[in-house]
Structures are given as C-alpha cells and as structure tokens.
Image (spheres, rainbow, N blue to C red):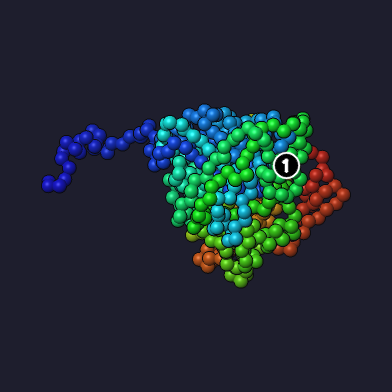
C-alpha cells in the first residue's frame, strides 16, 4: 500500500521465518570530542592532603575511546614533581610516570607526586569555585600533541594509590582546557588503597552538566592558564612553592624518604606567577563535599568525635553552611535543617541529609552469635526520588566463602550487591568473619551519588550469621552507626521482599519517609545489653561469643547452583 514498505524491503529486514533481523556491531560507539593540539589540566583540590597531590596513571582518549599514544616528552607539570623542592633531587615520582602504562598498582615508583598549591578559600560556602579565580597559581598538567591535532573525548584516570592513608593525596577536582577553550571542571574518585580490582575512572568531556553529576561548566569561560617556562637557573624553596602551615616540605620529604640526602642547590626554578589573570568564572561547581585539610584516618573515629565533626561541618545538622561541609549537595551551598522533619521517625543515629559521594562503605563489626561467618541477603541504596541505585562495583575486603578452599563453586559472593533487593532470587553474600580488620563491604559509583535511604536484608539462611553492629561511611566519613535486626522465622513468613527489609533514612522527603517509616528499626533495651564473663562476651542465650574461647575449626558450608 501507499506509504508502506515493499515486500523486498520486508524480506531484507526479516529472516526466512519472518523474525526481524538483528546483529551486534563490533565497532566502538563514537563519542563527541574536542579537536585540539594541547590539553591543560588545572588541579583545584586533593582528597584531604594539604601538602602533596599525585596521580598513578593517565590516558587521553580519542573519539573512539581509545588511548592516544603519548611520549613522556609531551607531558609537563607545574610544579613538576618533588624534585622542584629545595634539597630534593632524586625522587622517582616524576610526571612521566603517569604515562608508563603501569596503572593498577600500589608501587609509588610508578606514580607522580608534586607539591600541592592550595587554592584560596572561596568566600561562598560549600562548593568549589563559586568565586574561583584562575589567575591564582595552581597545579598544572599540560599535554602537548605537537604539530598533530587530536580529537580528545576524555580520560582514563587512576588516582594516587600508594596505600590507604596516602590516597588522600589524590586529585579531587580539576578543570580541563583544550587549547584556549575551557571545557568543564570534573571530580575524581578517591583511589581504594588496594589493587583487588582495576580502579580506573573514565572522565568524558561531553558528560552533560547536571545537579547529580561530577561536572560543572561556567557561564563566562576563563582564560587558559599558562605553564611557566622552566629555565635552569635557581630552585625555589618549599616556602615559595606552598603556603605556610606545618614544617617545611623538604623536612617532611626527608622524614618519609631518609635515604635521600639534601643536595646542593641546583637549577630547576618555578616562577612565582605561572598563571595569567582572567575574570573569575560565574560558576565552577563540582561534586559533593570538601574535606578538611587532614588525612582521613583509616580507623573509624569515636562516635563523639564524628558527631562533633559532622555537627560542625554539616548544614543539615547546624542549619548553616561552611567550607567543610561533607554533605553539601551538588548545586546547593546550603542544606535546610531537617531536625523537625525527621523527629517523627525515630532512628538509632542522627543521620545527615542526603549524603553524597563515590564510595559507600559498610563496616560489619559483629554477628548475631556466629564466630565463623558473616552475611547479608542484600543492600539497596535509594536516590532522592526513592528509586534504587545501581552501583558500578561491589568489593568485600575479606572476599566471600568462594575464596575458601573447597568452596570455589559457592554462589554467595559480593556480586549479590550489584542487583539490589534480593526478592525471591535466592541471592545472598557470606564471608569468613574477621575482627581485625573487620569485614567491610564497599559499593562504588563513577559519579558523586546522593542517597535518601539504605535498605538492608539480613542473612536469612542461618540468622545467627547475620550482621549485628555496623557502620556506614561515605568517602571515609561516618554517617551512621547502629544494629541490624536479626532475621527470624516470624519475619513475614521468611519473605525476602522489600516489605521485610530494614531501612535507614537520610531524607526529609515526606513521600519517602511515609513509605519507609515501618522499616526503621530501633533495638529494644534487652538487645542493647551485652553480658561478659572472665572468658569473653556471652549472649542472652548463654553462648560464648568473645575472643576468650579457644579457636575452633571453621565449619564448612555450601550453596551452589
């Protein structure tokens, strides 16, 4: 008929049985890039270290998301590395190491580290760059393609990953310039401090700016900062490179690397004013929170210290702003006070409003009585609309029972947490129970992610192996401490659906509170009582749980498909 497809067209699109044809293309999807002869990265902040900034590896991607081949002579930085400090000459962490293709590593001989030039504190609370001035001196990385122009679509980035403590030296916020054109300001995820998985982060230049993303663009693009010339005349002292505060950097460097002896002054100066002036951008906003100028502790702080720190920094508790707010939402300088809103839902911990970050970590401190295994049926994070979020990766520091000898086919792995609610799927996670260091579970996102609620399904197959005491961290900041309810046979006839989960609320939205109100759990006084004798902790059933008992062999367990 008129306007319809001919029989020849239909035959070309369908198989002999009339089924439509389909195929999977092996060609990479093209990504919109920026054609340029050079790239300049302006580093604004670290993940907390006030003295040093570093990267493990960096790849520049073309429009097919393939790495562009680069020579070490094509990359430069200012400050270039620690060798720009007075008295330091042989530090191996030079800028060319980010191109040596050794990416997923903890060996700092394959990383770059340089003095960090702290940006002036913005007068606007909360976000980076409400009044950022690119004329101020910053850390720069410049990649020059020479006479060839490339279409740059983004980066593969591995942040500084020497160990758990030193990950705070990684890049947090940086701006990108292609030739003279300002692109956007992006946020980097903090490195994990281990290499149990590839911690690469993909940053795309055409990533659209929005309230939930890790990218912001300015209304009035600033001029591109200039990399200073590097005449070999004299070397600046550490006091000229960094702002005052603490001991001189060369002293700290010698303390960390005692084998390095102070060298006589040698050339490699850094001009005092490497950047040229320009109007302050109208808005350069990135991400979620600003860390204080101190390295986050690997071990959790006491509840009283964290409560004081959160109360001082979080607008959601104090009703005010502040540069240190760890819970500032993207696009907002202040968060409204919600104490009155949340008073109608009693919880075990005063939770912040809409915590936001890349990594959500759950420290699982104890079980309900089992001394050998700890497990969960599922964990689900909800966004600000109450919809489930899908993490990109799940990691358990002690793995799962699949890692034990003879249990290689067990299906109770941490991949369970990539699928959210277990429903009736039979999914669950079980791991050997460890006290030092305690079991922890991490959910990773590629962008800063805000949550309104966390749902937990405790271990149902053997309830004594379920989680009891636990803590929740967002990018190493404590946001919750409490007890998970033990799964019992009376819990909705053993149902594992959304109606039998336990919810922890981080929101003041009435529609989410009304839906999750009945799932909030406050333990009874009896559940909060712990009994002790001379051998260790004893539960209310008379079973010993503490470390005073002699270690017995772990019993075997199995769940296979």
Number of numbered tags placed on the structure image: 1
Residue 234 in which image quadrant: top right
Farthest residue toward the left? 2
Q: Judge whether residue 461 can be spotted in this image.
A: no
Q: Secondary structure at mark 1?
A: helix
Residue bearing mark 1: 249
Report x, y in % for residue 327. 60, 58
Residue at 39 percent of width and 42 percent of height? 32
497 to 68, vertically: above or below: below
Is residue 283 or residue 73 the one in the foreground? 73
How would you rate the neighbour count of disc 1 (Cα within 10 Å): few for under 14, some for 14-19, many for 20 or more?
many
Residue at 55 percent of width and 29 percent of height? 72
Residue 486 in which image quadrant: bottom right
Residue at 15 percent of width and 47 percent of height? 3
Farthest residue toward the right? 534
Q: Quick check: 196 left or right of 210?
A: right
Q: Judge whether residue 211 can be spotted in this image.
A: yes
Is residue 424 or residue 196 the one in the foreground? 196
Report x, y in % for residue 42. 55, 45
Report x, y in % for residue 491. 60, 57
Residue at 74 percent of width and 43 percent of height? 248
Report x, y in % for residue 492. 57, 58
Is residue 43 or residue 19 the one in the foreground? 43
């Amino acid at each position: 008929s008129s306007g319809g497809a001919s029989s020849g067209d239909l035959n070309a699109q369908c198989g002999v049985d009339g089924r439509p044809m389909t195929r999977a293309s092996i060609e990479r999807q093209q990504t919109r890039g920026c054609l340029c002869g050079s790239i300049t990265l302006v580093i604004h902040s670290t993940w907390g270290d006030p003295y040093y900034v570093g990267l493990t590896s960096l790849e520049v991607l073309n429009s097919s998301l393939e790495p562009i081949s680069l020579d070490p002579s094509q990359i430069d930085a200012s400050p270039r590395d620690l060798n720009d400090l007075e008295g330091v000459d042989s530090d191996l962490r030079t800028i060319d190491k980010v191109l040596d293709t050794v990416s997923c590593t903890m060996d700092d001989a394959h990383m770059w580290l340089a003095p960090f030039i702290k940006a002036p504190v913005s007068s606007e609370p909360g976000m980076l760059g409400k009044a950022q001035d690119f004329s101020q001196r910053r850390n720069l990385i410049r990649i020059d393609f020479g006479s060839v122009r490339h279409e740059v679509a983004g980066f593969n980035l591995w942040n500084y990953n020497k160990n758990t403590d030193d990950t705070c030296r990684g890049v947090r916020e940086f701006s990108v310039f292609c030739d003279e054109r300002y692109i956007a300001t992006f946020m980097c995820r903090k490195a994990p401090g281990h290499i149990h998985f590839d911690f690469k982060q993909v940053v795309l230049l055409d990533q659209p700016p929005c309230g939930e993303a890790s990218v912001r663009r300015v209304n009035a693009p600033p001029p591109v900062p200039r990399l200073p010339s590097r005449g070999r005349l004299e070397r600046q002292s550490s006091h000229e490179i960094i702002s005052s505060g603490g001991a001189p950097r060369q002293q700290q460097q010698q303390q960390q690397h005692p084998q390095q002896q102070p060298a006589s002054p040698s050339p490699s100066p850094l001009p005092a004013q490497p950047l040229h002036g320009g109007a302050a951008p109208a808005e350069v906003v990135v991400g979620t929170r600003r860390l204080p100028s101190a390295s986050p502790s690997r071990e959790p702080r006491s509840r009283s210290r964290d409560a004081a720190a959160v109360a001082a920094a979080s607008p959601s508790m104090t009703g005010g702003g502040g540069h240190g707010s760890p819970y500032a939402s993207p696009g907002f300088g202040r968060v409204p006070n919600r104490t009155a809103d949340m008073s109608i839902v009693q919880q075990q911990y005063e939770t912040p409003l809409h915590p936001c970050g890349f990594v959500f970590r759950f420290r699982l401190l104890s079980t309900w009585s089992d001394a050998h295994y700890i497990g969960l049926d599922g964990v689900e994070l909800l966004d600000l609309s109450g919809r489930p979020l899908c993490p990109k990766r799940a990691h358990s520091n002690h793995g799962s029972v699949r890692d034990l000898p003879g249990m290689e086919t067990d299906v109770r792995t941490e991949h369970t947490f990539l699928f959210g609610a277990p429903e009736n799927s039979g999914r669950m996670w079980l791991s050997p129970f460890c006290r030092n260091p305690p079991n922890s579970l991490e959910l990773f996102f590629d962008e800063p992610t805000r949550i309104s609620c966390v749902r937990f399904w405790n271990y149902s197959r053997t309830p004594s192996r379920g989680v009891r005491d636990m803590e929740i961290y967002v990018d190493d900041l404590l946001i919750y401490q409490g007890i998970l309810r033990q799964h019992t046979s009376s819990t909705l006839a053993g149902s594992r659906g959304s109606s039998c989960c336990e919810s922890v609320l981080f929101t003041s939205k009435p529609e989410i509170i009304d839906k999750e109100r009945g799932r909030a759990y406050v333990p009874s006084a009896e559940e909060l009582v712990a009994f002790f004798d001379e051998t260790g902790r004893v539960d209310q059933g008379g079973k010993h749980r503490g470390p005073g008992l002699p270690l017995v062999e772990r019993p075997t367990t199995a769940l296979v498909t």
